[in-house]
Image: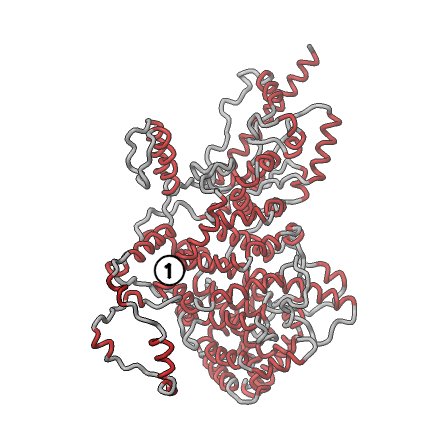
């Protein structure tokens, strides 16, 4: 009896501890849902041993990194000597016209007069002299660092000089020079004759792209100390880049065509990293980032007469906490050994997001044979539950109220199609016939069905895409009565029209570069050389130089992945808001170009190693390297890296790629099946080992899409993931994602779904842009015989010589059967 009382007391103490744990976690969870600030001790709670190995990553997702980080990523470490070359070119010319003063000591009028001299120098015929003047302009855009003492001063003078350069009309002159360099066939042929393309082959292009990138990146950012004229200059620059000012097309199209030429081998010496960075920042500047997207979405819903948005997805995601990663094989083995030594089961503490729903993964695998097909997956073991109920403390010791989480972070949504499917099933069951798409008539249905429909309609959400697709369907049915559609000429619309005819080639080019930059890709002889603007003329001779070059190469690839992922995500999101079929057109070409397996190939690596990679040398990063004296490079300096917990650009790239994958596969059963066929579940499961809430959220969404196809055994073995999906991903009423009973999941409909979507896209493009054929179908027809025969027909000159032959072959050789006219029409 004494032993029994001791056992009961220990169980009761464990129960009280469990209640305290639940109450604490529920308070923290509710605080996050309501938008309140939660203490850090709730955010960093970890009860699983694996959590110690993978700490929470304190990462805040945004449009881009800090301005210092973005400027430093423009330059490779092999470009370090060129900072001094830019300074020398400036000082050599400024010494003559600067009257013995420094740039920072002159007045604004003196700055403008000297800039006019530099702009005149950019128009000289001599290529060498043009390059010197361009380097002097680049030194000004870099912040005249030789006259500064701190990094803050460099950024300040860079902002001042860049706005001054724009005011003097520098950007237009740079675009003309860039076009000249792109069309320079001599530079292309000379680089092709070399055994290996190096940094020296792209000097002119790199200088021009550096200046343009600095102007776009610095001017698009609003500062607290901005002058009023700077704000107007920013708006004017945005308009200049968005509209077809340069060669009758937007500036982004020029960069897209340059990327396409590079992939086709026409400009192998092109510094592709700088082009991609400039293209990304141009799109970001012209279209706006995620905050601008949210504002445009709110305005669009008001314009279409839709209810306001339920929440801002990025703001809600920032309140989420990362959950513990799934147990690895080593963790499962250790838990089994401990369980064997104890000889009996005990209640284990679990992470706050999955403690309510399931046992740990190891116990699931151990008890598969005993469970069979019965029982509810995720329940507490019956023996443990019975013991817990019997040995609870007396009523006076039990807390009066248990604080379980009463709400989830996302508002539930219901589509119109979900209500239609629910009523179709209910009518077949209770009445015996259906009423099509009627969602109002509830005659003959029992009261619980009425209440269910009422609840579904309360959470009904109509997206902008659904309204646009319905309007397009009406325009296709009644093109004459509805008249011509008024299309607002927004920057997104203008860019789509300009790149429409070559859009498939642009998407393929981006994916080719992405494949070459992926860390899991192997070097092939036929792959694109993305290191042309990185490799020095003389290869390293020492171990230190080789280490430095190796870090530079890895960093170079990471920046390319970052730029492409951010660029594609921005394009997809803005195009979907502008018109859903523009988004679907880009998405379909990405899918046809194998974007889905490419992204999965990227994630088929150790994500924690990629996210925490230290491929950077802090002392060589701009502007630190131009302000401070460079120390002697040693192995310790090269291996030090930065002191951050993770690499911002790599985590940013991973989240972007997961978001792109979500965009491509959402509501597309055929593409979800591609995730299943390419065995993405174990890849996405490894992604969850990185403890960052936003990264986990989009990985869990992708797992939720395909859960119904993975089978019962997979769900039983991955109950922790099922629990995390329930807690993190938005709920949709009537969505039986965990059981696989969806009537839309029939495999024979997959190909028809993709073909039907393609037909709708082609009809949209032909109606609005005349892409596939002209509108001859609706042109008036001349039925008058005299006027038709009276039309002048131009014939080739040699027709009269072959006229008799034509008559014999086309007229006399075919007998006329007049009796066929008397036969009735079939």
Nearest to the observer: residue 469 or residue 779: 779
Q: Quadrant of residue 426?
A: top left
Label 1 CA crowd tier, 10 Å (few <14, some 14–19, many 20+):
many
Residue plotted at (66% across, 67% down): 620
Residue 716 locus on image (x, y percent): 59, 34
| Left or right: 324, with 570 as reference point | right
Q: Which residue is mark 1?
A: 763
Is 250 on the left-hand or right-hand side of 486? Answer: right
Determine whether 521 is above or below 403 in the image: below
Can residue 645 be seen from the camera position used here? no
320, 443: nearer the viewer: 443
- Which residue occupies the extreme bottom position in the image? 125
Above/below status of 277 relative to 727: below
Q: Please tell me in which quadrant of the rendered image residue 647 appears.
A: bottom right
Image coords of residue 509 (percent x, y) = 55, 66
Figure check: 281 above or below 602? below
Q: Position of residue 58 (x, y in %)?
A: 58, 49
**Residue at position x 33%, y 33% from top?**
433
Quadrant for the N terminus in the image? top right
Give the total of numbered labels.
1
Foreground pick, 231 / 282: 282
**Residue 701 in picture, x, y percent from top left:** 52, 45
If the image is split into quadrants, where does the C terminus sit?
A: bottom left
Residue 617 horizontal side relative to residue 488, left or right: right
Question: Residue 256, can we see it?
Answer: yes
Classify 54 as above or below 151: above
Point 37% across, 50% down: residue: 466
């Amino acid at each position: 009896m004494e032993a029994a009382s001791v056992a009961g007391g220990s169980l009761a103490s464990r129960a009280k501890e469990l209640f305290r744990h639940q109450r604490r976690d529920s308070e923290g969870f509710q605080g996050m849902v309501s938008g309140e600030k939660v203490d850090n001790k709730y955010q960093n709670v970890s009860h699983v041993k694996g959590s110690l190995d993978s700490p929470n990553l304190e990462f805040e997702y945004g449009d881009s990194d800090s301005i210092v980080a973005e400027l430093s990523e423009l330059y490779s470490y092999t470009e370090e000597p060129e900072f001094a070359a830019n300074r020398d070119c400036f000082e050599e010319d400024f010494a003559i016209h600067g009257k013995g003063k420094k740039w920072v000591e002159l007045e604004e009028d003196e700055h403008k007069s000297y800039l006019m001299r530099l702009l005149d120098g950019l128009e000289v015929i001599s290529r060498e002299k043009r390059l010197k003047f361009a380097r002097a302009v680049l030194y000004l855009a870099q912040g005249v660092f030789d006259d500064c003492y701190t990094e803050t001063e460099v950024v300040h003078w860079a902002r001042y000089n860049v706005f001054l350069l724009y005011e003097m009309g520098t950007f237009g002159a740079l675009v003309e020079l860039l076009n000249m360099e792109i069309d320079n066939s001599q530079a292309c042929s000379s680089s092709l004759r070399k055994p290996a393309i190096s940094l020296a082959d792209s000097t002119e292009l790199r200088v021009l792209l550096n200046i343009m990138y600095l102007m776009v990146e610095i001017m698009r950012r609003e500062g607290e100390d901005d002058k009023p004229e700077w704000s107007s200059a920013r708006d004017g620059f945005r308009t200049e880049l968005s509209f077809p000012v340069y060669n009758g097309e937007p500036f982004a199209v020029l960069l897209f065509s340059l990327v396409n030429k590079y992939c086709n081998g026409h400009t192998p010496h092109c510094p592709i990293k700088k082009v991609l960075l400039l293209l990304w920042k141009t799109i970001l500047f012209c279209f706006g980032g995620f905050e601008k997207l949210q504002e445009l979405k709110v305005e669009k819903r008001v314009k279409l007469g839709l209810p306001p948005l339920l929440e801002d997805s990025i703001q809600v995601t920032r309140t989420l906490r990362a959950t513990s990663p799934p147990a690895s094989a080593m963790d499962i083995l250790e838990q089994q050994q401990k369980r064997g030594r104890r000889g009996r089961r005990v209640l284990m503490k679990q992470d706050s997001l999955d403690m309510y729903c399931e046992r740990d993964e190891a116990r699931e695998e151990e008890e598969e044979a005993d469970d069979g097909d019965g029982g509810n997956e995720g329940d507490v073991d019956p023996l443990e539950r019975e013991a817990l109920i019997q040995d609870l403390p007396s009523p006076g010791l039990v807390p009066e109220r248990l604080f379980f989480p009463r709400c989830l972070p996302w508002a539930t949504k219901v589509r119109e199609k979900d209500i239609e499917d629910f009523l179709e099933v209910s009518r077949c069951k209770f009445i015996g016939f259906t009423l099509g798409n009627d969602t109002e008539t509830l005659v003959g249905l029992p009261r619980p069905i009425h209440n269910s429909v009422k609840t579904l309609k309360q959470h009904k959400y109509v997206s902008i895409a659904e309204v646009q697709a319905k309007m397009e369907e009406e325009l296709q049915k009644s093109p004459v009565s509805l008249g011509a559609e008024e299309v607002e000429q927004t920057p997104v619309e203008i860019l789509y029209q300009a790149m429409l005819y070559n859009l498939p080639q642009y998407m393929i080019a981006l994916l080719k570069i992405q494949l070459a930059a992926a860390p899991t890709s192997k070097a092939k002889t036929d792959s694109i050389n993305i290191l042309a603007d990185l490799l020095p003329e003389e290869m390293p001779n020492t171990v230190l130089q080789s280490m430095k070059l190796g870090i530079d190469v890895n960093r170079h690839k990471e920046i390319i992945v970052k730029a492409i992922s951010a660029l594609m995500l921005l394009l997809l999101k803005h195009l979907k808001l502008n018109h859903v079929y523009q988004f679907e057109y880009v998405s379909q070409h990405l899918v046809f170009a194998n974007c889905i397996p490419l992204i999965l190939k990227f994630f088929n690596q150790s994500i924690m190693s990629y996210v925490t990679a230290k491929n950077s040398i802090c002392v060589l990063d701009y502007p630190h390297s131009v302000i401070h004296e460079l120390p002697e490079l040693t192995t310790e300096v090269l291996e030090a890296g930065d002191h951050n917990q993770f690499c911002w650009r790599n985590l940013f790239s991973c989240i972007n790629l997961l978001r792109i994958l979500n965009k491509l596969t959402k509501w597309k059963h055929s593409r979800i099946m591609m995730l299943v066929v390419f065995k993405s579940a174990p890849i996405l499961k490894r992604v969850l080992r990185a403890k960052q809430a936003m990264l986990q959220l989009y990985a869990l969404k992708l797992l939720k899409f395909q859960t119904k196809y993975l089978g019962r055994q997979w769900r039983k073995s991955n109950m922790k993931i099922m629990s995390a999906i329930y807690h993190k991903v938005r709920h949709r009423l009537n969505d039986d994602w965990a059981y696989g009973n969806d009537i839309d999941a029939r495999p024979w409909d997959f190909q028809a779904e993709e073909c039907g979507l393609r037909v709708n896209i082609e009809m949209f493009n032909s109606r609005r842009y005349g892409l596939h054929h002209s509108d001859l179908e609706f042109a008036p027809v001349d039925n008058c015989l005299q006027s038709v025969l009276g039309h002048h027909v131009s014939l080739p000159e040699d027709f009269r010589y072959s006229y008799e032959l034509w008559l014999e072959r086309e007229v006399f050789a075919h007998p006329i059967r007049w009796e066929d006219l008397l036969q009735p029409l079939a």
